[in-house]
Image: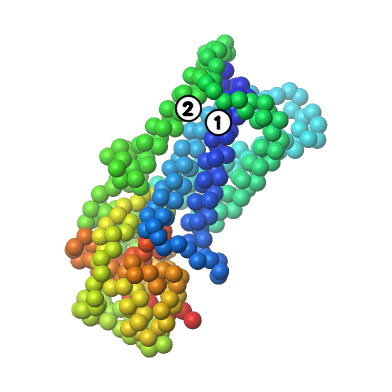
Amino acid sequence: MPHHPRVATVIGRLLIAGFLLCLVTGLYSHYLQDPLPWQVFPTRPVWLYRVSHGLHVATGTALIPLLLAKLWTVYPRLFAWPPLTSLRHGLERASVALLVSSAVLQLFMGLLNTWKWYPWPFSFRTVHFWLAWVVVGALLIHVAVKLPLIVRYRRTGRPRRVRDPGTGWTRRGFLTAVGATTAAVTVTTVGQAFTPLGPLALLAPRQPGVGPQGLPVNRTAAQAAVTVPDDWRLEIVGATPASFDLAALRAFPQHDADLPISCVEGWSQSARWSGVRVRDLLDAADAPPGAALRVVSLQTRGSYAVSHMTPEFTRDPLSLLALRLDGEVLHIEHGYPARIITAARPGVLQTKWVYRLEVLP
Ligand SMILES: Nc1nc2c(c(=O)[nH]1)N[C@H]1C(S)=C(S)[C@@H](COP(=O)(O)O)O[C@H]1N2
Ligand SMILES: [Mo]
C-alpha cells in the first residue's frame, strides 16, 4: 500500500536527512564563494570541499526520485474532500503547497545547473540560497504539523507485504522499487566526483579523464574570449608593485600540489599542479604574509573572471600560481600561462588565465 502513512513517513525521514545534508554542504559552498568578514575556512583535508560538494550534488540528485515517490504516496490527499475543514487544516495545506513547490523547484534547479543549463534570467546561486531557507522552513512546519503521525508510524522493522488492491503494490515492494531507483540514479552519476565509480557515470554530465591533459574543462578560452598577449606578464599590485614574465616565474622555487578541481556543478578530479607559491609571490611584492588577494584574469566575457582569496588560503603552502599540470605546460583551456589552484575551495575560485594579483588592504 504505497499510499499508507507508514510509507510516507519512511520516505519523509530520508527526505529530511537529505535536505538537511544539502543545506549544510550548500551553505559551506555558498560562504566559501561569498565569505562573511569574520569567516575563516579550513584548508585541510585538501579533499574537504570535494567530498562536501560531491555529497551535495549526489544527495540532491537522489532526492529527486525520493521526492517523486513521496508525492505519489500522498497525492490522494490532494483531492481530500471537503478541501478545507478548519483554519488549522487550511494553514497545513498552505504549508504543504509551499513545501512541495519550493522543494521541486530547488531540486530541478540544482539538476539543471549540473548540466550547465541556466534557463532563467536570475542568479542561480542567489535564488538557490534563498529557496533553501524556504524549503527548510516549510519542512519544519510540516514536521511539526505531522508529528503525531510521525510518532505513530515510527516503528522500524520490515514493511508489510500486504498488497494494495487499488495499485497492486505492497508497501515493501514499493519501498524496494524506490530504493533501487534512487541507488541506480546515484551509481550512474556519482562517478563524476567519486573517481573509483567514474566508469559507471553514464548519466553524469561529465566523465572523469575526458578533456585536454585528461582533465575536464568548465569554460574554454574561446567561451571566455581570452587571448594571451605575447608579452604576457604577471603583475602584482601591492605596497611595492612587481611584475614577472613567464621565465621569471619559472625561476622561482617550483612546488607541486596534488589537488582536485571541484566544480560547483558537480564534477571533480584531482591532478598534480606545479608552480609558484602564492605566499612567495606576496613576499616578492613586499606584501604582508596572509594578505587577502583579488585575482584578475584575462577573461573579458562571462562570470568568474575575478576571484578573491582570503588570508588562510594566501598563507597556505599548497596555494599555487600553477604553471604546469601533470608535468606539462598548462594547456590554454586549463589557464595557460598561469592559474590559481588551492586546497579545499570550489572550482569557481581556481581562476584561470591570471594576469594580475591585487593585494587587498
Ligand atoms: N578565468 C576563469 N577561470 C575559471 C573559470 C572561468 O570561467 N574563468 N571557471 C572556473 C570553474 S567554474 C572551474 S570548475 C574551473 C575548471 O578548471 P578547468 O577548466 O581547468 O578544469 O576553472 C575555474 N576557473
Ligand atoms: Mo565550476
Helix, strand or loop for disc 1? helix
The span from disc 1 to disc 2 (Cα, nearest Å) is 9 Å
Image disc number at residue 178: 2
In the rendered view, tell whether residue 78 sits above or below residue 213: above
- For the residue carrying disc 1, how many other residues have a C-alpha within 10 Å: few (<14), some (14-19), or many (20+)? some
Instruction: Say which residue label 1 marks.
Output: 11
Image location (x, y in percent) of residue 247: 20, 79
Q: Amino acid at mark 2?
A: Val
Question: Could you tell whether 194 is left or right of 149 in the image?
Answer: left
Residue at (36, 36) in percent of width and height: 187
Quarter placement of the N terminus: top right
Q: Amino acid at mark 1?
A: Ile
Residue at (29, 43) in percent of width and height: 196
Image disc number at residue 205: none
Residue at (39, 32) in percent of width and height: 184
* The quadrant where residue 49 appears: bottom left
Image location (x, y in percent) of residue 190: 37, 42
Q: Are marks 1 and 2 in contact (CB under 8 Å)?
A: yes
* The quadrant where residue 191 appears: top left
Choose between 304 and 12: the one closer to the eye. Answer: 12
Question: Could you tell whether 70 is left or right of 197 in the image?
Answer: right
Is residue 125 in sight in this rendering?
no
First in sequence, mark 1 or 2: give its number. 1
Image location (x, y in percent) of residue 112: 45, 45
Helix, strand or loop for disc 2? helix
* Ligand 2 closer than 8 Å to label 2 CB: no
In the rendered view, tell whether residue 127 sits above or below residue 283: above
